[in-house]
Amino acid sequence: MLEKNYSISFVRLIAMFMVIVGHILPQWDGMSNNIFVIVLQSCTVLYAIISAILMADAKYKDPLVTIKHKACRILKPYYIWVLAVFVIYYLTGSDISIWNIRTMLFLGQNNSVYNQFVLPGLGHLWYIPFILGCYLLTPIFDWLWKSVSTLTVRKLFLFLIGFCLVFYWIGYNWNFLGPASWIPYYMVYGGVFLLWKYYKTNISNFEDGKRYITKVISGGVIFSSAIYIYIVWFKSQNLTGTRFVWFYKAFWGMFLFDILYRTGEYIKKWDVIRKILNISDAYNYDVYLVHKTWLAGGLAVGSLKMAWPVKMIVFVLEVCVSTVILHKLTGITICKRRDRK
């Protein structure tokens, strides 16, 4: 069994805080002309990178069994929480239609027609069909890995450039992977999957590769930030929903991952940090599922007539209680790992 990677756990913890802080901000949905919000939104990229690394590290006999297991672990708490929200909305007299139910039950967040029927407080769950799409693409990435595993570092990077160009063209023109805004995240997932498997296989020969990756990512963030500042601050143009912003978030996500992972490597030696990260790992996904329900829609804490600090205390209590309840209800009894070697 692989030793637990506490650096990954640290990145996951920070990503969770980025999601929550971002959703608390009132300008979150106005998004892309606020660089602070863009940086917070790159938490999606952090989660995609984490998933890619964990899938690349996994040792399973059958990829399809792996996907089934992952889907089970994701969908079981998802459906429990969505059904609970349906009941709560109904009991509190909130508007809910058959289209709301269809959209949430059949993961319609990636469809432009059904997306308008996503229930308030559950809009962040678009990530669920996205990550399931990543898992479905993993056998293809694994097949590609078998073709590139013997390449030199330089040839691997050239291959990844070509891979990104082809993947972007297919995803954008065929539109079978969900909204076009997801394409950069799929590219990050696939690229990290291949890079991580290569790194784990050629650790001793990858030092130059690691430095090159850091330089490329840092250069990408600096260059794209300069373009962003020029267009938004000096030209006063709105970049919301543009392809530039999609890739800008991807660069920020990779840049932050590099920094956070290195930080995790340093602090993971402390016992108290490892204990905190163990707790975070156990409840991270549950927190992600429940938190926005208490920030938007009929259950929003903002609608309470209280001082802002009191609202935040109520919000934290609501998230903690609902997280623990969801975690207990979910369990892992039908998702046991029977497929490991």
Image (cartoon, rainbow, N blue to C red):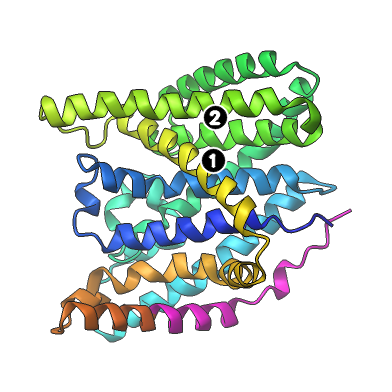
Residue 305 vs 295, above or below: the answer is below
Where residue 177 appears, x then y in whole percent? 48, 36
Q: Is residue 103 visible?
A: no
Residue 290 vs 240, above or below: the answer is below
Residue 264 vs 336, above or below: the answer is above
Give the crowd class for mark 1: few <14, some 14-19, many >=20 residues within 10 Å.
some
Where residue 270 appears, x then y in whole percent? 65, 66
Amino acid of disc 2: Thr
Front residue of this view, candidates 132 and 25? 25
Per the rendered image, the range of residues in magenta is 319-341
Question: In which image quadrant can residue 336 be found?
Answer: bottom right
Image quadrant holding the N terminus, namely bottom right
Whether pointer 2 and pointer 1 mark residues with C-beta atoms closer than 8 Å, the reply is yes
Residue plotted at (20% across, 39% down): 33
Q: Where is mark 2, residue-wise?
A: 214
Mark 2: secondary structure:
helix
Residue 258 — which label?
A: 1
Position of 134 with respect to 245 (left or right) is right
Position of 82 with respect to 212 (left or right) is left
Front residue of this view, candidates 31 and 114? 31
Front residue of this view, candidates 178 and 257? 257
Amino acid of disc 1: Asp
- In reply to whether residue 153 is colored magenta, the answer given is no
Position of 162 with respect to 63 (left or right) is left
- Whichever of callouts 2 and 1 sits on the residue coming sooner in the sequence is 2
Residue plotted at (48% across, 29% down): 217
Residue plotted at (65% across, 77% down): 331
Mark 1: secondary structure:
helix
- In reply to whether residue 333 is colored magenta, the answer given is yes
Q: Magenta region's main secondary structure?
A: helix
Position of 250 with respect to 34 (left or right) is right
